[in-house]
Image (cartoon, rainbow, N blue to C red):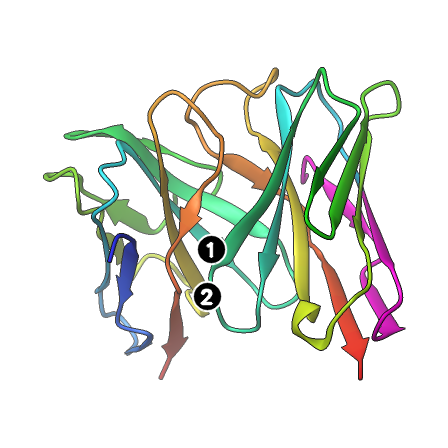
Amino acid sequence: DGGITQSPKYLFRKEGQNVTLSCEQNLNHDAMYWYRQDPGQGLRLIYYSQIVNDFQKGDIAEGYSVSREKKESFPLTVTSAQKNPTAFYLCASTWTATNEKLFFGSGTQLSVL
Amino acid sequence: SQQGEEDPQALSIQEGENATMNCSYKTSINNLQWYRQNSGRGLVHLILIRSNEREKHSGRLRVTLDTSKKSSSLLITASRAADTASYFCATGRSRGGGGADGLTFGKGTHLIIQP
């Protein structure tokens, strides 16, 4: 099946801990994105990558880091510097040089213990 | 602030009725897209309308775009219980909307279809 897979579905973070959210796609998409969604809110862009080994900050990058070592993978690390990490995190991908038709994963709910 | 803003925030109708949601945006766009999100799930792309189009249909969905008013509407006809979800409009982050630098989403309209 072609698609975009996020794991885990639920994740708990302790104070001062870094946690990493996984995002893998087999759609051969060049561009990948991480969004954060708070209850009753729209999506806010954290980071995006248009090509392997390159990525740019979105609107709320502070406290987060990413890597793009492979075309298929775009992991997001929520660092201890992110003081309010509890949210629903969504990964998306699409073809290069367009903002048309993003494909989304099923999301990871991150909570603080 | 968000590029797109949906209205109303919540809408509850009877099954079989039509549902209309509106979206307003602020800057020039290349296209406007609508997405659906079921509770606790990812978003699913529904339909895209380009800036030079005024109306587009896809099954029970009808989207209109008025670039002079910077607004769009999504109409779902003959609603079903399975249409219960949140609906978001989205536009490109960059002025003009081109490129692959991601989309800006509104806060969404939560639609409830009463059986």
- The spot of residue A72 in percent (x, y) is 17, 44
- Position above or below: A71 against B99: below
Q: Which residues are magenta?
A: B1-22
Element class at badge 2: strand
Q: Chain of mark 1?
A: A
**Depth check: A105 or B104 in front?**
A105
Q: Which residue is mark 2?
A: A88
Total numbered circles: 2
Residue plotted at (43% across, 36% down): A58
**For the N terminus of chain B, which image quadrant?**
top right
Which quadrant holds residue B58?
top right
Are the residues at dot 2 and dot 1 in contact (C-beta closer than 8 Å)?
A: yes
Residue plotted at (67% across, 63% down): B86
Q: Is residue B18 visible?
A: yes
Which quadrant holds residue B91?
top right
- The spot of residue A83 in percent (x, y) is 41, 63
**Depth check: B77 or A23 in front?**
B77
- Position above or below: B3 against B78: above
Alpha carbons under labels 2 and 1: distance apart: 6 Å
**Depth check: A53 or B76 in front?**
B76
- The spot of residue A51 in percent (x, y) is 22, 27
Residue B4 forms part of the magenta stretch: yes
Type of the residue with mark 2: Phe
Q: Which residue is mark 1?
A: A36
Disc number placed over residue A104 in the picture, else none: none
- Position above or below: B21 against B90: below
Element class at badge 1: strand
Which quadrant holds residue B53?
top right
Same subunit, tags 2 and 1:
yes
Mark 2 or mark 1: name the one nearer the start of the chain.
1
